[in-house]
Image: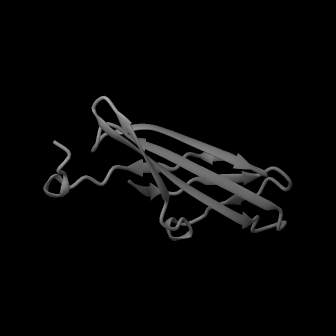
Amino acid sequence: MKITHPPVLKCKTCFAINKPTIEDFENPETQSYDRNMGPEIEFLWTLDFECEKCKSELTVQISGWEYPIGIMNYQVTEVSGCSIAEEALLEVEFDQNNFNYL
């Protein structure tokens, strides 16, 4: 799974719009859970940064779940110090040639 469009965030202190880039979100942490139709994979990106205008501390955490393999199941974005002006877009990266679950 990858971020194809980063979130747009509004600082709660000064109301400035902050636009982190895709490059700001490094490789996600991943966890896998056994489910009925194969593994469910959770991807987690966390970014701590300062508001571009007032330097307040802002945090955004994006979670995405792939289940079954190759299908985007769910997405959640949690923030601190800011609000979400525009959600991130996630996309599943699936290569049938590398899939050997069955």
> Which is more toward the observer, 45 or 29?
29
- Numbered circles on residues, count: 0
Instruction: Choose top left, top right, bottom left or bottom right for residue 84.
Output: top right
Q: Nearer the viewer, residue 15 or 91?
A: 91
Is 96 situated left or right of 15 in this image?
A: left
Up-down relation of residue 72 to residue 80 (above or below): above
Residue furthest top in the image: 36
Q: Who's the residue at 49% across and 60% down the image?
A: 28
Q: Residue at x 82, y 68 (%)?
A: 55
Asked which colour scheme the image uses, the reply is one colour
Q: Is residue 89 left or right of residue 62?
A: left
Q: Residue at x 84, y 66 (%)?
A: 54
Question: Which quarter of the image is occupied by the C terminus?
Answer: top left
The location of residue 26, given as percent across then percent down, is: 52, 68
Q: Position of residue 66 (x, y in %)?
A: 37, 42
Task: Say whether residue 44 is left or right of residue 67.
Answer: right
Q: Image point 52% across, 50% down: which residue?
A: 88
Q: Position of residue 37 (x, y in %)?
A: 27, 32
Q: Position of residue 85 (x, y in %)?
A: 64, 46
